[in-house]
Image: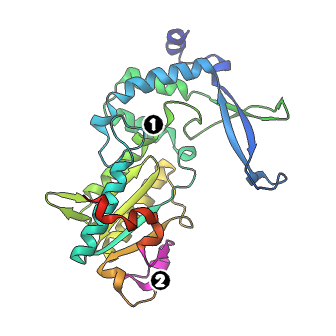
Amino acid sequence: MFHDSLKNRSLPRSLTEANISLILKKGKADNECASYRPISLLNTDLKLLSKTLALRLETVLPCIINNDQTGFITGRNSCSNMRSLLNVIQLSQSMKLDCIVISLDVEKAFDRVEWPDLFSTLQTLGLGETFLSWVKLLYDNPLSAVLTNGMIFSYFQLHWGTRQGCPLSPLLFAIAIEPLTEAIRRAPSISGISVGEKTHKISLYADDVLLFLTKPEVSIPAVLDLIGCFSQFSGYKINFSKSEAFSLGGLRHTNISPPSILPIQMDTTGFYISRYCDNSIPSPIICGKSYTFT
């Protein structure tokens, strides 16, 4: 069936359909749409196909996705992200570097992926026409319908976003965001923290992003410009109300009020400004820094 579908470039309709079950969030009013969490239920045969593709993709992702990204990549875990953050904190404080750490919250990250951009990135990374054809097949006319009180309403077509509940989705997202992260790493106008021969600018776990920036008056506008450019064709969008910036090193001990911590006016960027990084990091880690680094 799968090979016939690939040959005909079309999946059976039952494989393209997903039912969305609405789960009421704890403590939320049941008469508001925002109170419900949508859970997408996919066809089992489709999940078998996507899992097969995911297993194959997992073998090559460590070779094509930078080590800064640890989410859902074989052999990597979030401990590396925490280690990087703690190392940056210790280094900036010991050397009194003027450093800013920015935690970016991405708005509906997986739901906003633009397929043409995703397919183009897959091709650029050299994953092969056959694999690309399989991925395109998965995203050929996908349908969803809301399941409420045991009743399925009319199906509607999806036009962007990775599919919820699909084993391939987190891996595709890591690929979709890689052009942006690579552009940040390579941009000469964005200054990170240098340790030996390596410069740390960014740390990611799937869609969770941390930026480590020095020379913030230059680096922050450059980052925002890159994200703005990337957003135009990728669907990537920052939720500034949930993003946060905090200062380290020399900037942390300034007497200037939080919105003016930087040489630029941070309030114009939309980030929430936290004066002390300890508010943003779990206290057991802060209290045990001496043990963490040993």
Mark 1 vs mark 2: in front: 2
Horizontal arrangement in the rendering, residue 144 relative to residue 116 (left or right): right
Q: Is residue 140 above or below residue 208?
A: above
Please provide percent x and percent y for residue 210: 39, 59
Residue 263 appears in the rendering: no
- The C terminus, quarter of image: bottom left
* Residue pictured at 37% horizontal, 44% vertical: 70
Within 10 angstroms of label 1, few (less than 14), some, or many (20 or more) residues? many
Residue nearest the observer in this picture, 208 or 130: 208
The picture quadrant where one finds residue 220 is bottom left
Residue holding disc 1: 172
Q: What element carries label 2?
A: helix
**Distance between mark 1 and mark 2 Cα atoms:** 37 Å
- Say whether residue 287 is magenta: no
Horizontal arrangement in the rendering, residue 150 relative to residue 87 (left or right): right
Please provide percent x and percent y for residue 159: 60, 38
- The N terminus, quarter of image: top right
Please provide percent x and percent y for residue 19: 71, 31
Magenta extent: 259-276
- Say whether residue 272 is magenta: yes
Q: How many labels does the image show?
A: 2
The amino acid beneath tag 2 is: Pro
